[in-house]
Image (cartoon, rainbow, N blue to C red):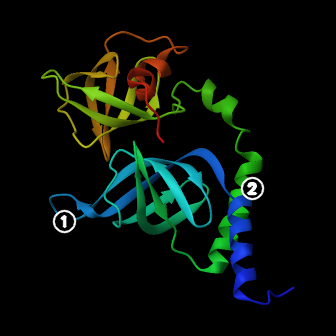
Amino acid sequence: MPLANAKSDEVVVVDRRQNSRIIVSMPGSYMLADHRNVRGERRTFPCRAVNISPEAMALAAPIRGRVGERAFVTVDRLGKFKGSILRLLDGGFVMSIVASEEERTRLAAKIDWVEQFKNFDIADQRSDHRFVPANPRSRIVLADATSEDCFVLDLSASGAAISAHTIPKIGTVLALATIVARVVRHFDGGFAVRFIERQDLQHIEDRVNLDSVLGYGLD
């Protein structure tokens, strides 16, 4: 039944947002309007969507940008989004989602679907040789003792794929939180390291998790 006034419309928006918000860990990528490479092209960074509603989303991301900066995001299974950074988080940011009411309705339906099925692939994901850590935030420490927060794209017993503002040269020895590693490969948006010693998969996430090392969380 059509809504009679603006007050009713406002209530519906609030209800939909409450009913269509999920906490997940979905991979994606993003670009920021003011972050460009030497050729003037917008740089692409990996990210993970950790909280999504039809109006806004929170991303765990290696480069936070600034409040008000435009962001362009692609999230697996949910699609492409654009908006502006509303708030900076410790290890990411919250952005608005620019969309029509029809697009928000479709997004709400996608969110509801993901909420129903988001846990079905956890066992398969964790049994893979490479897996995505539950908390991707970590820190690299270089030989000169300089350090920088980073984003762990995937982990295995022998190495990791990392995104950070600095891309160390191949052969560079560094620490990923508490694990010593060597840079072995560059790729678009980051680099890969091989651990000096093979790691125990039961404890590797704790060893690279920035919250465990420093004792603070995303929020």
Which residue carries the number 1 mark?
40
Q: Quadrant of residue 150?
A: top left
Amino acid type of disc 1? Gly
Relative horizontal placement of residue 91, taking residue 167 as reference (left or right): right
Relative horizontal placement of residue 88, taking residue 127 as reference (left or right): left
Relative horizontal placement of residue 66, taking residue 111 as reference (left or right): left
Q: Position of residue 108 (x, y in %)?
A: 69, 65
Amino acid type of disc 2? Trp
Secondary element type, mark 2: helix
Q: Residues within 10 Å of mark 2 (few under 14, many from 20)?
A: few
Secondary element type, mark 1: loop
Q: Residues within 10 Å of mark 1 (few under 14, many from 20)?
A: few
Residues at marks 1 and 2 touching, judged by CB atoms closer than 8 Å = no
Alpha carbon separation for disc pair 1 and 2: 39 Å
Which residue carries the number 2 mark?
113
Q: Nearer the viewer, residue 167 or 13?
A: 13
Comes first in the chain, label 1 or label 2: 1
Q: Quadrant of the N terminus?
A: bottom right
Count of marks overlaid on the render: 2
Q: Position of residue 216 (x, y in %)?
A: 43, 30
Q: Nearer the viewer, residue 90 or 61?
A: 90
Q: Nearer the viewer, residue 45 or 170?
A: 45
Please report the residue visible at 31 percent of the width from the left and 47 percent of the height from the top: 188
Q: Nearer the viewer, residue 183 or 205?
A: 205
Please report the residue visible at 69 percent of the width from the left and 72 percent of the height from the top: 13
Please report the residue visible at 41 percent of the width from the left and 18 percent of the height from the top: 158
Q: Position of residue 178 (x, y in %)?
A: 34, 17
Please report the residue visible at 32 percent of the width from the left and 46 percent of the height from the top: 189
**Please, which residue is most extreme toward the right here?**
1
In the image, residue 96 sits, relative to residue 200, either above or below, namely below
Q: Position of residue 80 (x, y in %)?
A: 51, 65
